[in-house]
Each structure stands twice: as structure tokens, then as C-alpha cells.
């Protein structure tokens, strides 16, 4: 199962739980499973069928441009990283 790390900003939707072990073949599958545990989180992460551009998703520590259909290895770690503003 993949481990999903939920940022502090969104943990309220997950009852404060920071990590979730979920199964799924793609990012979309995993986010749907996460939404089953944390109702409403999918809509905070996905907009118009795409990952929200103000968020980054890191797989095994590597932040890359990802899409809902991209595969995720069974033992991967996926971190949801909110954008940091400033200047």
C-alpha cells in the first residue's frame, strides 16, 4: 500500500491523521480512497479533472508534474505539498 502524507492545512478533513495507507494503481485511485477516509479532500486536491496547480505532489521525495492517471508503485510515499507564498 502507498503511504499518503496529508499536510497540516488539510488534516482537519482527516480527523487530524497525518498519514494514510491506501491502495490504488494511480494517483486518482489513491486520492479517491483518501476521500473515502477524509470526505471532501478530493475536491480540495482536484479541480476540473486535474490536480490543482497550487499544490505539488511528491512521489518518494521527488516533486514532478503529475496527473491523476499517473501510476503509483504499491509501496510509494506520496506527499501533498501546498504552495508556499512569499517573496
Image (tube, helix red, strand yellow):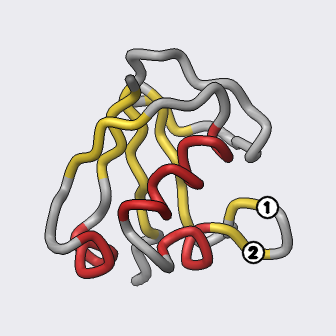
Q: What residue is at 55 percent from the left and 65 percent from the top?
A: 55
Q: Position of residue 46 (x, y in %)?
A: 68, 68
The quarter of the image holding the N terminus is: top left
Which residue is most to the right? 48
Answer above or below: position of 79 versus 80: above
Q: What residue is at 18 percent from the left and 74 percent from the top?
A: 15
Going by the image, does 54 lie left or right of 16?
right
Which residue is most to the front? 36
Query: Residue under circle 2?
Result: 47
Q: Are marks 1 and 2 in contact (CB under 8 Å)?
A: yes
Q: What residue is at 40 percent from the left and 83 percent from the top?
A: 86
Q: What residue is at 42 percent from the left and 38 percent from the top?
A: 78
Q: Quadrant of residue 76?
A: top left
Q: Residues within 10 Å of mark 2 (few under 14, many from 20)?
A: few
Answer above or below: position of 14 versus 59: below
Q: How far, Cα to Cα, is label 1 from label 2?
A: 5 Å
Query: Residue under circle 1?
Result: 50
Q: Position of residue 7 (x, y in %)?
A: 29, 64
Answer above or below: position of 5 versus 78: below
Q: Nearer the viewer, residue 86 or 67?
A: 67
Amino acid at each position: 500500500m502507498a503511504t499518503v502524507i496529508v499536510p497540516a492545512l488539510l488534516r482537519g478533513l482527516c480527523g487530524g491523521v497525518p498519514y494514510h495507507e491506501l491502495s490504488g494503481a494511480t494517483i486518482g485511485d489513491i486520492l479517491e480512497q483518501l476521500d473515502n477516509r477524509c470526505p471532501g479532500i478530493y475536491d480540495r486536491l482536484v479541480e476540473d479533472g486535474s490536480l490543482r496547480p497550487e499544490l505539488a505532489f511528491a512521489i518518494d521525495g521527488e516533486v514532478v508534474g503529475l496527473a491523476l492517471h499517473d501510476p503509483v508503485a504499491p509501496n510509494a510515499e506520496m506527499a501533498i505539498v501546498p504552495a508556499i507564498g512569499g517573496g
